[in-house]
Image (tube, rainbow, N blue to C red):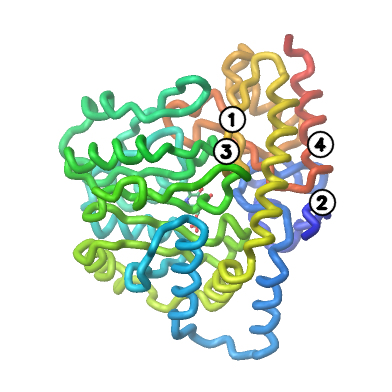
Amino acid sequence: MDFDRIPNRIGTHASKWDNMEGFSGVSPEDGISMFVADMDFDAADCIRDAIRQEAENGYLGYFGNVEPVTRAVCDWMHGTHGWDVQPDWVSYSHGVVSGFGMVLEAFSDPGEAIVLFTPVYHAFFRKAEAKGRRILQSELVQRDGRYEMDLDALAGQLTGEERIAVLCSPHNPGGRMWEPAEISALADFCAEHDLLLLSDEIHMDLVFPGARHVPTALAAPQATDRLVTITAASKGFNIAGGETGFIIVEDAELRAKIDAVQKSFGGTPNRFGMLMTKAALTEGRAWSEACRAYLAENFAIWKERIGALPGVEVMDMQSTYLSWVDFSNTGMTPEETNRRIRQDARIAQSPGAQFGKGGESFHRFNLAMPRARLMEAIDRLEKAFGDLQ
Ligand SMILES: Cc1ncc(COP(=O)(O)O)c(C=O)c1O
């Protein structure tokens, strides 16, 4: 567990590094990548051993017998998040976004709408649009420096064509952890307006020490008959290349609808994703704890220094490694802040407009990197915005 080791991921098929120039114009040779959401850390030894063992076995055919993986998922959910998931509630998707697409197909038709609480993870927009679903953006409001849902305003926006409300919990971007009462209020809203509640909990295993993720299923038990949870071990354990997500549904009728859609996709899970997931969830706890403590420390340093730049607000967060930074009080346009971040600081970040309404003046920065590299990024940004007063 050496989180300080600086890896060179250039030329390793790392989307975060090998796609950065095309995405941002910043060369990986002298730039720092802070956009794609994975970590510049080695995966836990238990995961690497599982892959090594597989290569040694040499049998790389179709994956069968998901039961030991499902047991690992259920044990982890119980032991870490206090949720008693039964094995038959769990099915697999090729990544969480793909599971998101399956849920859209199962519970809405083209032309119908989904509700997104924006700013929120950009792939939700792309996936919904690709499937011909319309998006109703319910803008989060900031109170005391944190985002809150405005369900009264949303009630006035509904047209009757919405079928699904999507909760991102913990929230990306911004790392907000919703309180159980807020989740429960959303569930009641969904019942009142007959919406499916889709809870994306992929960031559940990235909470900082002292914080606790409460699954939507526990915060809103009254929503069992309208709740679908999509999640994975991929974010928390840095194994997103394994493209393995879980769809967890207690209600048998909802499950049957998803099963029907899943049948129309490839049925066999990714061998490596499944084995990495099993290793992570059965043997990876110590790595996860150390990693989250490191990330929390990265965030504390980042917030102290970047938050000290005049007019720059770093939103407080209790989870994830995706820091959401508001430049609106700098008096600069988003184009100008983007130019300074990319051209002057040579950093590839995610511009906030990608995340929907309310994100325009922000940029999102991925802090999951060795401390020395983070310090370098902070130095560069301090220099690029050194004229702020
Ligand atoms: C909220 C959320 N859902 C899903 C994903 C991606 O899931 P996957 O790579 O498994 O499709 C991300 C990645 O950042 C995310 O933030």
Q: Earlier in the sequence, mark 2 or mark 4?
A: 2
Q: Say which residue label 3 marks.
A: 318
Q: Are marks 3 and 2 in contact (CB under 8 Å)?
A: no
Characterize the local packing of mark 2: few (<14), some (14-19) or many (20 or more) Cα atoms within 10 angstroms: some
Q: SS at mark 1?
A: loop
Q: Residue at x 68, y 23 (%)?
A: 307
Q: Quadrant of the C terminus?
A: top right
Percent of width and height locating residue 280: 60, 67
Q: Are marks 3 and 1 in contact (CB under 8 Å)?
A: yes
| Quadrant housing residue 325 | top right
Characterize the local packing of mark 1: few (<14), some (14-19) or many (20 or more) Cα atoms within 10 angstroms: some
Characterize the local packing of mark 3: few (<14), some (14-19) or many (20 or more) Cα atoms within 10 angstroms: many
Q: Residue at x 29, y 62 (%)?
A: 250
Q: Residue at x 19, y 43 (%)?
A: 191
Q: Say which residue label 1 marks.
A: 316
Q: Earlier in the sequence, mark 1 or mark 4?
A: 1
Q: Are marks 1 and 4 in contact (CB under 8 Å)?
A: no
Q: Say which residue label 4 marks.
A: 375
Q: Say which residue label 2 marks.
A: 4
Does the rendering let one see residue 294?
yes
Q: Quadrant of the N terminus?
A: bottom right
Percent of width and height locating residue 134: 28, 41
